[in-house]
Image: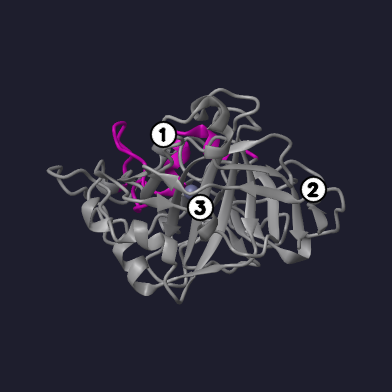
Amino acid sequence: MSCVTSREGPGAAPVAVDVGGSQKHGRWQGSVRAGRKDESGGNNVFDLVDGPLSDLSLDCNCNVWKDDMEWGYAENNGPLTWHRKYPLALGPRQSPVDLRGSDARPDTTARPLHRRYNPQAGCSLSNTGYGWKVQISGPTAPRKDDLMFWFSELSGGPLSSRYRLEQFHMHWGGYDNEGSEHTVDGQPFAGELHLVHWNCDKYDSFGEAAAQPDGLAVLGVFLQVGQPLKELEKVTSLMGKITHKGAHVDIDGELDPTNLLPAKSSYWTYLGSLTTPPCNESVTWIVFKEPLTISQDQLETMRSLRCFSEGEECPCDNLNGVLVKNFRPPLPLGNRVLRECAE
Ligand SMILES: [Zn+2]
């Protein structure tokens, strides 16, 4: 395994709001100055130069952030608005980022990534209102000696501790040419799977780890449209049972996380954040280079999920309460190190 490292130029990451994605709107012009290229020459970013967005005159009532409004992916509560309630969203270590091949330089210090995954029984699938999530159940009444063989864990590579699989979920778009959160040389994929792990050597729980700079490790897997992702059928076949926010269903049989990962283990890695509020800067990202495929039908089942609970009034937003897309656009890498490890 040979590894390469990249480092952006000196200087702190700018406090910036990316409007290069599909949520660009003229109403932001009151709080931002003209667009420019970021330090890496890629994303268009806009510096926040004046006061809070409440100072803005917004163009319709739907664009006013009410205190009790939940974050989401529609125009009125999408990624550009998250920092109002979640200030970390403007931090210097935010995710996702554009992964640029030209930024990568050799690094021979990384160890091989070690994945020790077990088929997991008793997992549950839920609609979080922001997408679907599979919660890993962990061992069911294991003998103490067997405990370590039941958990699915990740170590090696950029990680100096063991990280235990907690859940996995996915991001997608309204069209097949968008949907991933990370992009490669500016190009998005149709979707991105995230397998979320927490540092079980240093912390006692996922919740405790999620607030620590070395607390979480997330594997990212790009998805492009093609053949169905077979292991994901166990999830997508149940989408009709979790149509509304808060719905959940047990998954029969076993789920094998190994079947959700590409065969080749070449990857990018960098220090980043959760891509959803509260946007904690606690994630070591490991994004695989080799994409997997997902079928059109599998994607369509996800695009019909609702972001509101059954019986609740459909929210007044441009997506009519349907989760047609749930991705955050890339943010500047700034002065962070981007490493590229190849098999
Ligand atoms: Zn995610």
Measure how far apart labels 1 and 3 are at the Cα level. Answer: 17 Å
Residue where numbered disc 3 is placed: 257
- Where's residue 93, x and y in %? 64, 41
Q: Inspect the image, locate mark 1, and give the three-letter code of the amino acid beneath it.
A: Thr
Disc 3 + disc 2, Cβ < 8 Å: no
Quick one: SS at disc 3? helix
Nearer-N-terminus badge (2/1): 2
- Where's residue 111, x and y in %? 79, 48
Quarter where residue 330 is shown: bottom right
Residue 111: image tag: 2
Give the residues in magenta.
63-92
- Mark in front: 2 vs 1: 1
Q: Residue at x 82, y 57 (%)?
A: 4
Nearer-N-terminus badge (3/2): 2
The correct choice, above or below, for 301 with respect to 164 in the image is: below
Q: Residues within 10 Å of mark 1 (few under 14, many from 20)?
A: few
Measure how far apart labels 2 and 1 are at the Cα level. Answer: 32 Å
Q: How many numbered marks are there?
A: 3
SS assignment for the magenta stretch, majority = loop
The correct choice, above or below, for 274 with respect to 40 in the image is: above
Question: How has the structure been colored for display?
Answer: one colour
Q: Nearer the viewer, residue 133 or 124?
A: 124
- Where's residue 225, x and y in %? 45, 74
Residue where numbered disc 1 is placed: 140
Nearer-N-terminus badge (1/3): 1
Magenta span has 193?
A: no
Q: Residue at x 60, y 30 (%)?
A: 200
